[in-house]
Image (cartoon, grey):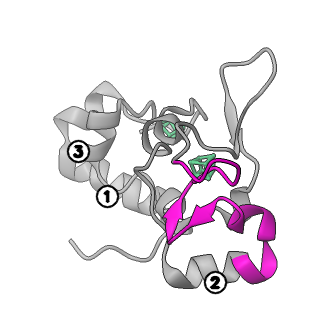
Amino acid sequence: MKDCNQCGKCCIHYSDGGLSASTSEIDWWEEHRPDIFSYVNEGQIWISPDTGKQLVSCPWLQKLPDQKKYICSIYDDRPNDCKYYPVDIAQMVRDECEMLEARDLLYLEKAQRTLDELMADSRPPVSR
Ligand code: SF4
Ligand code: SF4
């Protein structure tokens, strides 16, 4: 398994309504990050503050100039949904995540253990 190469596929895939945030995350944004909170509407993210409609792409996703890489401009304060991604190998296969290597598909349990180790600092322990 490779490190994330910031290809941006996951952000592009999920940001048009496929992400959610908890009440405590939303409350925290309201108090500490009103800029992020402005893209929340009735508990849903990411909603245009201008039109009240679901955005088709994440307002925080930025493509690096002259590169095929993306960055998250709210990285430290992004939703847990984003922090916990990718959760499992099946999801990575579905989303064509570029962390996957061909051998990961041959040894799925080992690949999942490697992923869990890589993600240990980003998400709560997963009991499998
Ligand atoms: S908030 Fe950041 S990590 Fe989440 S979809 Fe947007 S750009 Fe990606
Ligand atoms: S799809 Fe995979 S490799 Fe691409 S940015 Fe998301 S986690 Fe990283």
Q: Residue 103 vs residue 5: left or right?
A: left
- Residues in magenta, as a range: 30-53
Q: How many angstroms separate mark 2 from mark 1 (CA)?
A: 33 Å
- Judging by the rendered image, the residue that carries numbered circle 1 is 113
Is the shortest distance between ligand 1 and the CB of mark 2 under 8 Å? no
| Kind of residue at badge 3 | Ala
Residue 122, visible in the rendered structure? no
For residue 25, which quarter of the picture? bottom right
The vertical placement of 116 against 50, above or below, is below
Q: Nearer the viewer, residue 2 or 20?
A: 20
- Judging by the rendered image, the residue that carries numbered circle 3 is 90
Where residue 27 is drawn, which disc sits there?
2
| Kind of residue at badge 2 | Asp
Q: Nearer the viewer, mark 2 or mark 3?
A: 2
Percent from the top left, x then y, of residue 45?
Answer: 53, 59
Please report whichever mark, 3 or 1, sits nearer to the chain's N-terminal start. 3
- Would you say residue 2 sits in the magenta stretch? no
Q: Nearer the viewer, residue 75 or 88?
A: 75
